[in-house]
Amino acid sequence: MRTLLHIDASVRKATNPNPDHNSISKRIAMQFVDKWRSAKSTDNYIYRDIGINPPAFIDQDWIGAVFTPDDRKSSEQREKLALSDQLFGELFQADVILISSPMYNYGMPAPLKAWFDQVMRINKTFSFDLSRGDHPIEPILSGKTFILVTSCGEFGFGPGGEREHMNHLGPHVKTLGRYLGVESFYEITSEYQEFGDERHQKSVANALKNAGLLATDLASKE
């Protein structure tokens, strides 16, 4: 039995009175989930919509609590880390991580950055040892599969695209994924949203198709 952790980061709802306002990235991610669950009905599923219910930003007290040894943490510090501990617990269980996110200002939305900041913890997701020289940080977790679903207003953000140098979403998430124990990374992208033309419709259709195919393929692998 495997655990799928599903994180949605768009501030848009999946369904709105005006369908034009529906989140595209959430729709594509749900296509993955539906196909996954139809093939793996007995697997565990954990869901968070951090776009609608964003995690708190970390602050100085949070950092102080993280670097205080467990046997010396005050009750206030433990309370400060309660959400982080919960988010880490969900991550720790996950074999497959599905994150959907729109591209906001060429990068990740603030709620998604807040989630990464809360969940990435020294001695939990990564270790730090200066005896390793210039590369002291190493991931602790391993063996996880990561699927990133993105939606973009423009186009050409992929390898070789005319806006590849402006893509601060996918490469950032992939870099951070290593320190979540990610060993297999997939990205599904919908583009051209701001143009609203045939290219956009085709891009969404392809993303939905690819999400379903990838879910079916991954679900078949034990």
Image (spheres, helix red, strand yellow):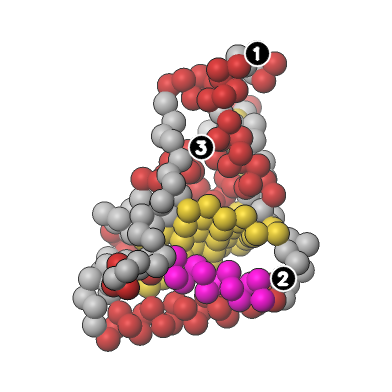
- Identify residue for label 3: 118
Pick out the residue farthest to the front: 17
Q: Which numbered tag is attached to residue 72?
A: 1
Q: CA distance from mark 3 to mark 1?
A: 20 Å
The answer to whether residue 2 is above or below residue 130 is below
Residue 187 on image: x %, y %:
48, 67
Frontmost residue, 85 versus 116: 85
User: Which amino acid does the dot numbered 3 rest on?
Assistant: Gln
Residue 46 on image: x %, y %:
62, 55
Quarter of the image with the N terminus in it: bottom right
User: Which amino acid does the dot numbered 1 rest on?
Assistant: Arg
The answer to whether residue 176 is above or below residue 81 is below
Q: CA distance from mark 3 to mark 2?
A: 30 Å
Q: Is residue 45 magenta?
A: no
Frontmost residue, 1 versus 124: 1
The residue shown at (44%, 31%) is 58
Binning the other alpha carbons within 10 Å of mark 3 as few (below 14), some (14 to 19) or many (20 upward) gives many
**Disc nearer the start of the sequence (3/1):** 1
Q: Magenta stretch mostly in which secondary structure?
A: helix
**Which residues lie in the magenta part?**
26-38
Q: Which numbered tag is attached to residue 41?
A: 2
Q: Quadrant of residue 141?
A: top right
